[in-house]
Amino acid sequence: MEDTYNNRTSLVKGATDMVKEAKRHAAKKVNKAVDRATDECSAHRNYSRFQDEEDEDEDFYRNPPNQDGKGYPDNEEGSSDATEGHDDEDEIYEGEYQGIPAARDKKHKEGQVALGQPMSDATRDRHELEQERQADEEELAQQYELIIQECGHGRFQWQLFLVLGLALMSDGVEVFVVGFVLPSAETDMCVPNSSSGWLGSVVYLGMMFGAFFWGGMSDKVGRRQCLLICMSTNGFFAFLSSFVQGYGFFLLCRLAAGFGIGGAVPIVFSFFAEVLSREKRGEHLSWLCMFWMIGEIYASAMAWAIIPHYGWSFSMGSAYQFHSWRVFVVVCALPCVCAVVALTFMPESPRFYLEVGKHDEAWMILKQIHDTNMRARGQPEKVFTVNRIKIPKQLDELVEMESESGNPVSKAFFRMKAEIHGIYVNLMKCFNYPMQENMTRLAIVWFTLSFGYYGLSVWFPDVIKHLQADEYASKVKIHTNERIEGFTFNFTLENQIHKNGLFINDQFINMKLKSVTFVDSTFRNCYFDDVTSVGSLFRNCTFIDTFFFNTDIDDSKLVDGTEVVNSTFTHNKKGCQMTFDDDYSAYWVYFINFLGTLAVLPGNIVSALLMDKIGRLSMLGGSMVLSGISCFFLWFGTSESMMIFMLCLYNGLSISAWNSLDVVTTESFPTVRRGTGFGFCNALCKLAAVLGNLIFGSLVGITKAIPILMASSVLVGGGLVGLRLPDTRANVLM
């Protein structure tokens, strides 16, 4: 009786197994038929590349399970327990969310896998999983290239081109706004010579840290979201910096603004490259580079038009001054605001979504790109035929969690620490084989090109101003042993030196002293009313019974042993006085920068048209070598006109190197590390800019030989290293 019951149970179990296996294989065949029909309808384009082994289906029908339920004839020791309770809903597909493991799933011992069940990731080696992900990424790269080609190049790419161009334009403005406002801001805020120059270095340092941080974060949370945050940060602190009065707060605001805009370059190029096909990538990334130079032209034109106009300023009492250079800072923040507004209407990069396993979101954006371009072409009926996209295997990351009882500040600090550690780990992978050698060469090229470019960018204007100063000093008028009594000065004194003068009962009313120096002079019973002095000093002078009302003459201008005897100062003007009235040199310096930026446009157009024809590396190395050679001709620049010509020539030759370097860097990294790698290279760029500003700036007026030889050697050396980089023209975006 008991044997009969056992036989009946075995029969039932065997029949159940056969039914379940038949259902499973029937479902597989239906899915195959659907995939085959889909492939035929999509013009024989193979997007899925998911092949099932048909031998399993044939083996099942050739060798069905025995009726006793103890397995297949070829495997007598097998057990039907492997398929017991295995329904068709339990089938697990790659890329599908598997949920949290139930307690019953832990019945197998560690290191053991049930027969017929897929091996879990926990029992597999980490290196093996990374190799599997690498294979998936290579397959996705090929498939994604086909998808982008089907989507076409049209209205969507041009819309994104303009939006990202505004963001890149903001970065160009931020770089050059510092140099334009530096003299005015330091004069307006009474910055001593010992603290001058910090403004330029602080902004570049902020951009350096911002490039590394935001570039790395874009690989974790997305291109669009990070770009929105960093551009908003820049816009807010740029506006705020135009209103603060203290130099310390101004430095802090520009540091924060630089930290925000630092992420623009790595994110913009990574974002735009991920919606371009291979044959369009080089040319259109080069066109995108033009916006950085448009930002430079915009900043130069606004500086030339706004800063010298002192009448554009206003004041609220004597403590709050809003001069024209602050208006210039506000105007320069407008491209950033426009970029933030426009970016809110654009979607995330679909390539990033695929990397993080968000298949449906990526598919919807790709369909949006396809439909937008097809409608613009007049083909709205054309259907997006892609229905399945390969998703790389998602690897779990071990993240240390903060206690729930912690305060918000500690949680935020802990989260920031974890994110920075993740960026560092991702960066270290960029230096692993096989990318180690290429990463080192890229870093050398970025550093040398930036050091030479930014160093000469500081040296050129300073040399021109030094030539102007020498010419201005040669026209100085010197008055010696003069005696003036009972005279009223109500006009401007400019570029004069008065030695051993005696002024008795004289009145200085409503006048300006511009670059006037009094040496060993005596003022007795004089009256100063509403006097503004710019670049003027009193050296070893004596004031006796003199009255000062509403002047800016203070201890900073009474130097070298000047004595004040029985004299009164009332209602002194607060702050440093500045004026650009009839200041020819200010107009001329801004106009020179404007001409230098205009010279970039022809080189930008040529590089965009020839990028895919002569190759990235030939353009990179050739442009850097030619730029280095052109530096030697600076030795013959003895006049302003010659220096301006050399400035335009150098800018026109170097722009091709910048464009090709941006394209090569974008194509050299896989998607999962593109933002991190580009951000690191751009951070090196800003570090080189700081060093170039300090080194080249200290050599102005001392010698020409060292700056010329230094710039030439680093540019030529960097160009030769750039020629050794791998050609990325035929690469698909990994």
Image (tube, grey):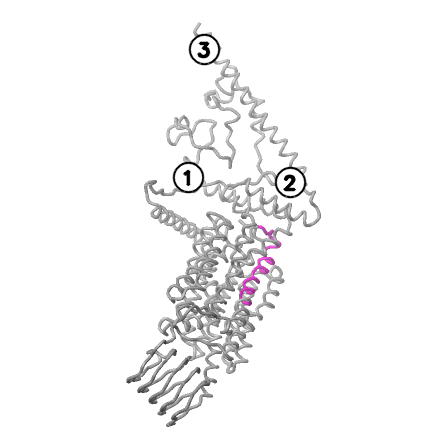
Classify residue 161 by image quadrant. bottom right
Residue named by callout 3: 6
Q: Foreground residue, 91 or 134?
A: 91
C-alpha span from label 2 to label 1: 37 Å
Q: Main secondary structure of the magenta part?
A: helix
- On screen, residue 528 versus residue 633, left or right, reads left
Name the kind of residue labelled 3 in the image.
Asn
Q: Foreground residue, 188 or 733?
A: 188
| Nearest to N terminus: mark 3 or mark 2 | 3
Kindly state the secondary structure of the residue where label 1 is placed.
loop
| Nearest to N terminus: mark 2 or mark 1 | 1
Classify residue 400 by image quadrant. top left
Q: Residues within 10 Å of mark 3 (few under 14, many from 20)?
A: few
Q: Is residue 721 above or below residue 388?
A: below
Seen from this angle, which residue lies furthest top? 1
Is label 2 in contact with label 1 (beta carbons under 8 Å)?
no
Residue named by callout 1: 125
The magenta segment is 275-297
Kindly state the secondary structure of the residue where label 2 is placed.
loop
C-alpha span from label 1 to label 3: 43 Å
Foreground label between 2 and 1: 2
| Residue 216 in picture, x, y percent from top left | 45, 52
Magenta-colored stretch includes residue 536: no
- Residue in the image at 39% along x and 32% along y: 111
Name the kind of residue labelled 1 in the image.
Asp
Residue named by callout 2: 385
Name the kind of residue labelled 2 in the image.
Thr
Q: Residues within 10 Å of mark 2 (few under 14, many from 20)?
A: some
Magenta-colored stretch includes residue 294: yes
